[in-house]
Image (cartoon, rainbow, N blue to C red):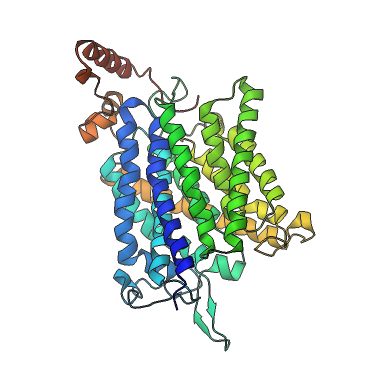
Amino acid sequence: MVNTGDTAWILTSAALVLLMTPGLALFYGGMVRAKSVLNMMMMSFGALALISVLWVLYGYSVAFGNDVGAGLLGDPGEFFGLKGLMEDTTSEAGGYPVMAFVGFQAVFAIITVALISGAIADRAKFGSWMVFSAVWATIVYFPVAHWVFDFTVIDDDGTVSHTGGWIANNLGVIDFAGGTAVHINAGAAGLALALVLGKRRGFGRDPMRPHNLPLVMIGAGLLWFGWFGFNAGSALAANNTAAVVWVNTMVATGAAALGWLLTEKIRDGHATSLGGASGVVAGLVAITPSCSAVSPIGAIILGAVAGVLCALAVGLKFRFGYDDSLDVVGVHLVGGLWGTIAVGFLATAAAPAGVDGLFYGGGLDQLWRQVVGALAVLVFSFVLTYLIGLVIQKTIGFRITEEDEITGIDSVVHAETGYDFASLGGSGGATLSGQAHAEARNTEGATRA
């Protein structure tokens, strides 16, 4: 029998997570140059459209079909086109329709792909991005989702009715809502693509500032709002676990924002709106894998450390010379690694996950599992993404020309501009002309210097 309360919570959570992708589009869009804002937002919306279709065709089956070997891959044909699932009234665990779970997991796949786009802002062909998104989702995200999210089902009589992925079942990693499958996965992929496409013109020389900080703040607010569905919805029930996760998500995020702002104040003398928004995202990333395993005090510690770590990590691109445009590596990879590994330190058996970490007398057992799971996803994603990106670059081309980059990717690729100043009248035309000349000299910038 369908539990209508749980089903309503799952569908509501799915809608919240879906809203995160337009929120990400605003967040990323505000951080790039005015001449790139539409392209940046289109990369998120393109992922939303494309991955929705692929998930229904075969993505869900690869991620949640019965394992076809060593916990690495679900059967692609088992639920192709979601065959047989419309008639199934409840999940294997009981309580909610399988199609509710299908929809909930679909929006995770969508935003994971969209997250990668921030690393290659200002310089990627939209068509090539769409090709990359399809290939990457197919051979990287869908299998990793199987590893992390697909749990083995054992019937009351001891019979195994469904075999899931190796990280969740064989390794025993705690990753409640996707620190590995979503954030480490996307962060490692972002680093690989940044290396394949190379640096933006003027990187490390020109001040690359966000063009619209109000958009960034609105986007961060929508991400924080939607993330309650992302984390608390992963309980798959309206129960105590969801409530604990909700509170941990709230408090870790607040602590991370404070940690980032304090770091900025000490280092630079100013606490910025961009830093506040980035701290929010860093906290959300870090608490994602650990939200069911830590206490609220543990969540505060975890979030505060994440804010400081990520604020410092965004400067690594200047030290090591890779152009991660919008700090996908500094926020999602570093934040995801910290949040996943921190379970091994801060987990308490009093939390819903019921496991003690090192600081609560649990020894090193959970810690080594968390480290192995995190590194496995990092290496897998980085290597395959680099190869996919390299093949696309060598065949159809991934990066726009330098001339097009100077002119502006919005006008060249999409034949549009984000801001039509000419329509304001005579003085607006002069403003547009002045802006165009400034952009041609590449004096306008994109993200944090």
State left or right for residue 24 relative to residue 405: right
State left or right for residue 280 relative to residue 24: right
Q: Residue furthest front?
A: 5
Q: Quadrant of residue 428?
A: top left
Camera-side residue: 143 or 431? 431
The quarter in which the N terminus is drawn is bottom left
Against 297, residue 242 (above or below) is below
Q: Quadrant of residue 444?
A: top left
The residue that appears at 32% across and 15% down in the rendered structure is: 438
The residue that appears at 45% across and 20% down in the rendered structure is: 207
Residue 219, horizontal then vertical, whole percent: 43, 38
Q: Residue furthest right?
A: 361
Residue 325 visible somewhere in the drawing: no
Q: Residue furthest bottom?
A: 157
Residue 269, horizontal then vertical, whole percent: 62, 19
Against 299, residue 351 (above or below) is below
The residue that appears at 59% across and 36% down in the rendered structure is: 257
The residue that appears at 45% across and 69% down in the rendered structure is: 4
Residue 284, horizontal then vertical, whole percent: 55, 45
Residue 147 visible somewhere in the drawing: yes
Against 259, residue 11 (above or below) is below
